[in-house]
Image: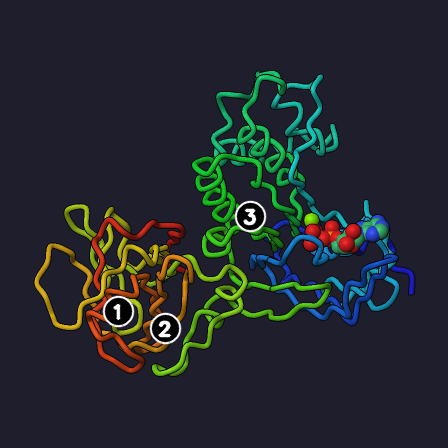
Amino acid sequence: MVIPEKIIESLVLENHEGAIQLTIEIINVIKSFLKFTLGPIDLKLQDNTIMVLIGPTGSGKSTLLNLIVGLTKPDKGSIYINDVDITNIPIESRRIGYSFQNPSLFPHLNVYENIVFGIRKRDRDNDKLKVKKLVESFGLSHLLDRNILGLSGGEMQKVSLARMLVTKPKIMLMDEPLVHLDIKTRVQLRKDLRRILKEEGVLGIYVTHFEDDVYALADSVSVLKEGIIKKSDTLKTMLTYPNDQSVSTSSISEFFQKDYNYLEGCVTESTNGITTFKVGEHKFEILGDYPISSTVGVLIKPEDIILAVDFVRTSARNIIKTKVAAIDDANIKTGILNIHLVINNVSLMSRITRESKEHLKIVNGASVYAIFKVTAPHIVREEKSK
Ligand code: ADP
Ligand code: MG
């Protein structure tokens, strides 16, 4: 069936006020190159969610994005947007935003001209407010007259993302867009990015190989290995540990060998620069002020979690009674161990020396207190209550 371009345009371009639920469905898609096959891929993504795609180099992440945007045609299978088969629709009619590792901007145009480049001239007046809002969201207002060549990497990436978003795509594909930026810029920009994608009601697919990007951005996560999706689920489900006595290492931790603890919860109190948030039954304290009922997500390094077998009074404000679920080697050479702790769906990991483990007689099933200071968690996600 040939779909008139208009249908796709209205499907994909309709702005959020007149919003339609948007679904991308990938059914049985296969793409083979000489030495590599992607698929069969089956994947369904819903309106206004951000899916973070992780996988080793060469696992087919970029190929999958290319198939969705239409740069590559599948050998088999179909891709649907809202039940419309777009498999053979030309790329320009899909109107899907695509951003790459290296932003390609027009050096002969200034920042503003680059941003509005994708808007038809006759629409530019109508879209003025939209452009202004996005420019402000990305903190680009002071740069509008500037030449592209003098911008920092982070600024260029912001311009590139803004340029895409002003065309009001309903879908944005992002292939490691922040990979070349320094850590500070990356942390700030991905925070902005998640907020903006949510505000704009955009369905996003974000490829990364950084663990903290996953926690900062994902609603759902897919793990791609050798062309096959090994796991695809909501971040919440992936991080839920069903049984206090077993560590079902999530695919995320398996992929990254779990370098961080991630806790996400609802803010219940915030006074004098200390915020309390709740994960299930458990309360945790972090530094900073956050609105009551908002959601915060924090990362804690395993090295920052101290274990004690008895309750001890310390200056650390986070003390949680847990059970040892598993012990494994973090580093065989140095004798550092990962101690996996689980209690009521909360999973934590502490990293201690073999000597400490022997000294404290830490074994599977033992009760221990996990202790960390308010300064240990790093906030990676903060969201207003819905
Ligand atoms: P990733 O983005 O996960 O690093 P890619 O999707 O870029 O992986 O590539 C997956 C595999 O497909 C690689 O082995 C790559 O060499 C191969 N590949 C990608 N595009 C082509 C192409 N146009 N022709 C031949 N091989 C390709
Ligand atoms: Mg790639």
Residue 92: x, y in percent? 81, 45
Instruction: Looking at the image, tell me whether mark 3 or mark 1 is earlier in sequence order.
Output: 3
Instruction: Report helix, strand or loop for mark 1.
Output: helix
Looking at the picture, does residue 66 appear above or below residue 142? below
Instruction: Looking at the image, tell me whether mark 2 or mark 1 is earlier in sequence order.
Output: 2
The N terminus: image quadrant: bottom right
Q: Which residue is mark 1?
A: 357
- Image position of 384 (left or right of 290): right
Q: Amino acid at mark 3?
A: Glu
Looking at the picture, does residue 314 appear above or below residue 164? below
Discs 2/1, front: 1
Query: Which residue occupies the foreground of this view, 2 or 260?
Result: 260
Instruction: Report helix, strand or loop for mark 2.
Output: strand
Looking at the picture, does residue 318 appear above or below residue 17? below
Give the residue at x 30% y 76%: 324
Instruction: Looking at the image, tell me whether mark 2 or mark 3 is earlier in sequence order.
Output: 3
Q: Is residue 10 visible?
A: no
Q: Which residue is mark 3?
A: 200
Distance of mark 2 from mark 1, alpha carbons?
10 Å
Instruction: Report helix, strand or loop for mark 3.
Output: helix
Residue 172: x, y in percent? 65, 49
Give the residue at x 63% y 49%: 15
Dots 2, 1 in contact, CB < 8 A: yes
Which residue is farthest front? 333
Q: Which residue is mark 2?
A: 327
Which residue is farthest right? 1
Looking at the picture, does residue 156 appear above or below residue 66? above
Discs 3/1, front: 1
